[in-house]
């Protein structure tokens, strides 16, 4: 198929092309003034420097991640005095590609890189090299363990404990539970599950009779719950892991289960609207909704700015870790959020510099804010 | 338009090899130009890329991918496709991050067993006539399963010696360039200038011919698979050193990327038609594309689609070059 470029003329042409390419290369070398790497050192002492920041996301195929990217871009765009330049890159689920992207970002001269990591370990080499080049690295949500990186985390164990404790209180410490888990083998799922089992140990009469994996996706959760329902005894409560309560509720409704069990919601518009509908028909139906906030990307952005400008003692965060609070929607806030959100949207509280500052200060004081119950933003 | 191979039995090996060399020139050329062009654009956009640090930063993450492409190339040379290379590299990474640091002998033994696994696959595919896609896909779950058994969630720590070996560089010439050059030259010399290299390639395109020439087709296939396994291990070695930790899923994207690299690099699924230089260049093209799109500032949502489109474009270009050549010759 691929045979020789035999004709002499063509060979001459190709040789010429090679020469041209090498000439370009050489020209590039000659003009290789290091315009990157030097973090924007303009401005006198004490003046606040804007950051040139990039977000490296390893996956943007679900609604949470899309909102996360959007939150970062909205915050960066709205605050030009804090952010001089910004960019989002996405590695499509591949850890090696994300490592490569991080290294390219360093070459492009970004002085700050925010990372939602594809793997806790696979990026550590690239992150270390970025740190060595003088770049401030903040990992958030899905963390990497590199020592030099600052971390913005959700306390997912607290997530599991909160929902399981709520369940135990409502059910009087007794009943059959179904758990809709996220994705097998990832740390988020492990942590929430650990939190749940920590609490359930104290209530021997509460039994986990079934587990399914809903992939943090309403439609998947609905299918998986519908499949397992016929094999289960009467379910009194369903524990969830976020963006899966609405589909779970639909599965129970379609199976004609009445009364509907107590289903912890996961902050999606679909779930909250479903919950509101069930409550209309059965006023005594009470539950709660909890999930992580996509706006954690903005929290990470603000932390990076504080680190670059040496504000709020952010450099001395214990174990370089701060927390973004989980967002809880109790009964009384339900209708406000249900009205504010689109069907597929996930509740979030857009993080301002003031809020991020308070998160950093609480972490520095040793009492990090792990949960909050805000009303939807008014705009 | 089959390329001439060892299979034209009356002719001695030597003369057919000269033909091979001639046809090899065409297949590696286009991908090499593409790789140089992409790199030149990157340098034009960011001159820093051409510095020693820049080269290390841009090329280092591509080395494991290039090794994976070479591994895939050997399997493609046998006329097969390896869908298990990603999990295999993942397992190698896990072994190097978890087993090797605590139990050197056990770890090395495990790596040898993995190589033996590749030999076993070759025997199975060759003797029983099983389709390679099915066997390698099945084995991919075996590799992944073992890796998850050893390391359920990502973690572990690679020995510091290994890390410094992989990060080796000189002040003048970047270490990555040295590694790429030596590897390419060695593999190209072996495939194109040695007798057994020719036999190996011939076994993929015309097994019957190789058999009649008095060589064992089974042994050739086993050799190709063991070579593939060896380069898979090398890929795992570099990934381990570069990341410093273990992750069973680390190389899952390499399955399709490595196949794309071989094909972009001038290889063909018909077997036998592969080029080491082309494969290395193909791997660089596939790997550099992502970085280039990022440099140009393609929006993150479009990056995957743009990358795919450019790959298809390269293949279309390749097909049209072949077509033009054919038309000219027949005229």
Image (cartoon, coloured by chain):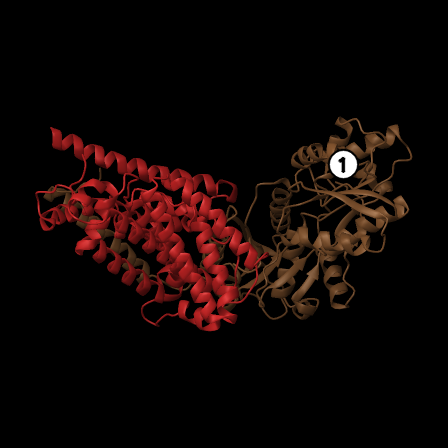
Chain colours: A brown, B red
Question: What residue lies at 68% left-to-right and 49% top-to-bottom?
Answer: A295
Tell me the crowding category of disc 1: few under 14, some 14 to 19, or many 20 or more residues within 10 angstroms, Cα based: few
In the picture shown, does residue B164 fall above or below A117? below
Give coordinates of residue A124: x percent, y percent: 53, 63
Is residue A288 shown above or below B241?
above
The front one of B159 and B38 is: B159
- Taking the spot 60% from the left edge, 65% from the top edge, the residue there is A308
Residue A273 lies in quadrant: top right
In x, y percent, where is residue A59? 55, 46
Residue A39 can be seen, yes or no: no
State the quadrant of the C terminus of chain B: top left
* Residue B262 appearing in the image: yes
- For disc 1, the chain is A
Name the spot of residue A145 as percent of width and height, x first. 59, 63
Quarter occupied by residue B50: bottom left
Q: Is residue B210 left or right of residue B261?
A: left
Disc 1: which residue: A232
Assign a secondary structure to mark 1. loop
Q: In this view, does B201 lie to the left or right of A248?
A: left
Q: In which quarter of the image is residue A347?
A: top right
Q: Position of residue A201 (x, y in %)?
A: 81, 55
Nearer-the-camera pick, A358 or A234: A234
Frontmost residue, B307 versus A340: B307
For the N terminus of chain B, the quadrant is top left
Tag count in the figure? 1
Left or right: residue A100 compared with residue B55: right
Name of the residue lying farthest toward the front? B128
User: In this view of the protein, which residue sits in the foreground, B283 or B140?
Assistant: B140
Height in image: B78 above or below B247?
A: above
């Amino acid at each position: 198929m691929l045979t020789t470029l035999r004709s002499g003329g063509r060979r001459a042409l190709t040789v010429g092309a090679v020469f041209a390419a090498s000439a370009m290369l050489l020209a590039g070398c000659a003009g290789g003034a290091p315009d990157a790497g030097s973090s924007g050192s303009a401005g006198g002492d004490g003046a606040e420097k804007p950051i040139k920041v990039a977000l490296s996301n390893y996956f943007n195929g679900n609604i949470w991640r899309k909102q996360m990217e959007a939150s970062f871009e909205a915050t960066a765009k709205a605050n030009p005095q804090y952010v001089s330049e910004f960019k989002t890159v996405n590695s499509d689920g591949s850890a090696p590609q994300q490592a490569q992207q991080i290294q390219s970002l360093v070459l492009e001269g970004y002085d700050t890189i925010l990372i939602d990591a594809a793997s806790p370990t696979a990026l550590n080499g690239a992150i270390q090299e970025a740190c060595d080049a003088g770049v401030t690295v903040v990992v958030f949500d899905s963390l990497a363990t590199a020592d030099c990186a600052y971390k913005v985390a959700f306390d997912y164990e607290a997530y599991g404990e909160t929902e399981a404790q709520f369940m135990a209180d409502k059910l009087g410490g007794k009943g059959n539970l179904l758990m809709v888990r996220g994705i097998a083998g990832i740390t988020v799922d492990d942590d929430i599950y650990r939190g749940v089992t920590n609490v359930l140990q104290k209530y021997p009469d509460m039994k986990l009779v079934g587990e399914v994996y809903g992939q943090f996706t309403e439609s998947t959760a609905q299918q998986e719950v519908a499949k397992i329902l016929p094999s289960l005894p009467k379910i009194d409560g369903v524990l969830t892991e976020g963006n899966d309560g609405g589909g779970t509720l639909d599965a129970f409704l379609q199976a004609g289960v009445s009364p509907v069990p107590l289903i912890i919601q996961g902050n999606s518009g679909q779930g909250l609207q479903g919950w509101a509908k069930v409550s209309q028909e059965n006023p005594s139906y009470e539950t709660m909704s909890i999930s992580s906030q996509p706006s954690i990307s903005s929290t990470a952005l603000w932390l990076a700015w504080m680190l670059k400008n040496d504000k709020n003692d952010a450099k001395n965060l214990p174990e370089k870790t701060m927390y973004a609070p989980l967002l809880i929607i109790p009964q009384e806030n339900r209708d406000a959020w249900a009205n504010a959100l689109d069907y597929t949207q996930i509740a979030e509280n857009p993080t301002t510099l003031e809020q991020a500052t308070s998160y950093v200060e609480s972490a520095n004081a040793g009492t990090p804010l792990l949960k909050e119950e805000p009303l939807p933003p008014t705009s | 338009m089959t390329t001439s191979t060892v299979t034209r039995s009356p002719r001695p090996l030597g003369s057919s090899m000269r033909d091979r060399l001639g046809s090899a020139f065409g297949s590696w050329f286009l991908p090499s130009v593409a790789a140089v062009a992409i790199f030149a654009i990157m340098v034009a956009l960011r001159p820093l890329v051409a510095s020693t640090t820049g080269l290390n930063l841009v090329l280092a993450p591509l080395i494991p991918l290039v090794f994976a492409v070479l591994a895939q190339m050997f399997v493609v040379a046998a006329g097969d496709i390896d869908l298990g290379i990603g999990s295999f590299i993942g397992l190698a990474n896990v072994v190097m991050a978890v087993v090797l640091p605590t139990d050197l002998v056990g770890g090395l033994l495990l790596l040898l067993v993995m190589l033996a696994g590749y030999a076993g696959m070759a025997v199975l595919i060759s003797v029983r006539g099983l389709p390679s896609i099915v066997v390698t896909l099945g084995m991919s779950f075996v590799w992944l399963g073992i890796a998850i058994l050893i390391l359920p969630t990502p973690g572990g720590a690679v020995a510091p010696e290994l890390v410094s070996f992989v990060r080796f560089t000189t002040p003048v010439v970047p270490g990555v360039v040295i590694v790429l050059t030596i590897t390419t030259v060695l593999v190209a010399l072996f495939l194109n200038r040695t007798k057994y290299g020719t036999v190996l390639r011939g076994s993929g395109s015309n097994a019957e011919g190789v058999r009649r020439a008095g060589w064992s087709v089974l042994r050739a296939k086993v050799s190709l698979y063991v070579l593939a396994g060896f380069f898979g291990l090398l890929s795992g070695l570099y990934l381990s050193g570069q990341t410093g930790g273990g992750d069973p899923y680390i190389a899952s994207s390499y399955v399709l990327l490595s196949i794309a690299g071989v094909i972009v690099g001038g290889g063909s699924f018909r077997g036998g038609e592969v080029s080491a230089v082309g494969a290395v260049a193909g791997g660089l093209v596939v790997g550099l594309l992502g970085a280039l799109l990022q440099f140009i500032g393609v929006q993150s949502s479009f990056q995957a689609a743009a990358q795919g489109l450019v790959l298809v474009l390269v293949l279309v270009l390749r097909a049209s070059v072949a077509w033009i050549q054919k038309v000219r010759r027949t005229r």
